[in-house]
Amino acid sequence: MDKVPGRLISILYRKNQIYLNTALKPYHITSAEQPVLMFLYENPGVTQEEIAHYLQVDKALMTRTIQALVQKGFVRKEKDQVDKRCNRVFLTDEGVAIREGIKNSLLEWNKILLGDFDEEKQQAIFSILEELVDKVDEFEKNKEKHSTIDR
């Protein structure tokens, strides 16, 4: 059982978290908060639920992460004008100000991971990873469908 992709993915994930937590320390954010900010840079004013769906995390985790970013002054929440149960999330000026630092940290990590690979190999890696995510998503959908039928 030497060739277990889950083990290697887990190792890469942990090393990614360690690297990012160190690299992002000067910006006072964590590796868990960074993807939320990156998503907001491209999608200002989305709901917490939309962020959770995009990042494939549960709503409770997203609520805690957003609350931490609010307390740090990087984002603000506003009640949705139509659906008062929803919060829309916006970057503050402080959140916008750290964008380049975060982006540079991510680019540096990508360089560490992929720097020795040519463009073709990099694209192949991304394609394979996307296929794995799609495969797991499909498995979860089928599992959900079958568990609903069994009830």
Image (cartoon, helix red, strand yellow):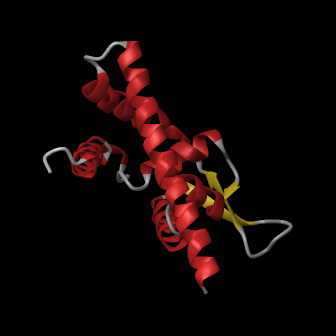
> Is residue 56 in sight in this rendering?
no
- In percent of the image, x 57 and y 70: which residue is there? 144
Seen at 70% across and 52% down, the residue is 45
- Residue 90, given in percent of the width and then of the height, sits at 64, 53
Residue most extreme to the right? 82
Q: How many marks?
A: 0
- Front residue of this view, candidates 20 and 71: 20
Looking at the image, residue 51 sits to the left or right of residue 126; the answer is right
Residue 49 pos. (x, y %): 64, 64
Q: Which residue is pictured at 59% across the width and 82% down the height?
A: 150
The answer to whether residue 49 shows anywhere in this view is yes
Residue 82, picture quadrant = bottom right
- In this view, which residue lies farthest toward the left? 2
Q: Is residue 124 left or right of residue 146?
A: left
The C terminus: image quadrant:
bottom right
Residue at image coords 64%, 78%: 149
Quadrant position of residue 113:
top left
Instruction: Answer above or below: position of 22 versus 88.
Output: above
Residue 39 lies left or right of residue 112; in this view the side is right
Work out whether 73 lies above or below 118: below
Give coordinates of residue 30: x percent, y percent: 35, 53
Q: Nearer the viewer, residue 148 or 96?
A: 148
